[in-house]
């Protein structure tokens, strides 16, 4: 019986060794796949690092561009504000000139005799009257050779 028991134990050890060898083979295959995945993961990480560096440089360039645009916009805004003030002053001066011209045109008109039979003239708006007076004034100046 001891001889049969020895063979049974040896057979059991052989089976266990066969199972162990099979399991080691399976683990080896899994480790190979893991190493292949590790290499692809390293390549992916390297690409991500490169893309991140490119994005950081692009963001730096955009910040620089925004700073330049902000400075240019600030100077243009200041110039536009100054020009707006100049235009406002020029418009006020032009309004004063038109008022003086209308006073001159009204003063230069000969007195018209009142005609009772004539129907009353339609009322002309103040702006149209000023424009007509200005046109008459410029026509008189052109006729005398003083206006260009």
Image: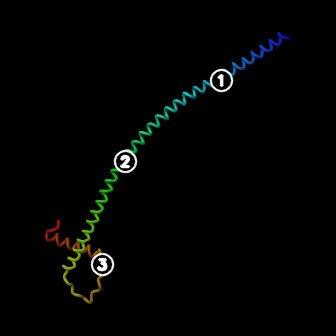
The crowd level at tag 2 (other Cα within 10 Å; few <14, some 14-19, many 20+) is few
Q: Position of residue 88 (x, y in %)?
A: 29, 65
The crowd level at tag 3 (other Cα within 10 Å; few <14, some 14-19, many 20+) is few
The residue mark sitting in front, 3 or 2, is 2
Which element is circle 2 on? Answer: helix
| Picture residue at 75% right of the left edge, 16% below the top | 13
Disc ID at residue 27: 1
**Foreground pick, 120 / 7:** 7
- Against 65, residue 90 (above or below) is below
Quadrant holding the N terminus: top right
Q: Position of residue 9 (x, y in %)?
A: 79, 15
The quadrant where residue 128 appears:
bottom left
- Disc with the residue nearer the chain's start (3 vs 2): 2
Identify the residue position indicated by label 3 in the image: 124
Quadrant holding the C terminus: bottom left
Left or right, 113 with reference to 16: left
The quadrant where residue 120 appears:
bottom left
Q: Position of residue 81 (x, y in %)?
A: 31, 59
Q: Give yes or no for contact between labels 1 and 2 (Cβ–Cβ under 8 Å).
A: no
- Against 51, residue 144 (above or below) is below
The quadrant where residue 136 appears:
bottom left
Identify the residue position indicated by label 2 in the image: 67
| Picture residue at 32% right of the left edge, 54% below the top | 76
Q: Position of residue 50 (x, y in %)?
A: 46, 34
Which element is circle 3 on? Answer: loop
| Picture residue at 33% right of the left edge, 51% below the top | 72
Q: Give yes or no for contact between labels 3 and 2 (Cβ–Cβ under 8 Å).
A: no
| Picture residue at 29% right of the left edge, 56% below the top | 79
**Foreground pick, 16 / 26:** 16
Left or right, 127 with reference to 11: left
Disc ID at residue 103: none
């Amino acid at each position: 019986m001891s001889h049969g028991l020895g063979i049974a134990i040896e057979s059991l050890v052989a089976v266990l060794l066969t199972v162990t060898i099979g399991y080691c083979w399976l683990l080896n295959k899994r480790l190979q796949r893991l190493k292949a995945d590790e290499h692809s993961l390293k390549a992916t990480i390297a690409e991500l690092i490169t893309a991140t560096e490119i994005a950081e440089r692009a963001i730096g360039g955009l910040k620089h561009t925004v700073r330049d645009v902000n400075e240019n916009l600030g100077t243009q805004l200041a110039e536009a504000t100054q020009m707006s003030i100049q235009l406002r002053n020029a418009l006020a001066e032009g309004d004063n000139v038109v008022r003086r011209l209308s006073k001159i045109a009204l003063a230069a008109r000969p007195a018209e005799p009142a005609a009772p039979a004539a129907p009353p003239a339609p009322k002309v708006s103040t702006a149209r009257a000023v424009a007509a007076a200005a046109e008459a004034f410029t026509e008189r100046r052109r006729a005398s050779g003083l206006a260009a």
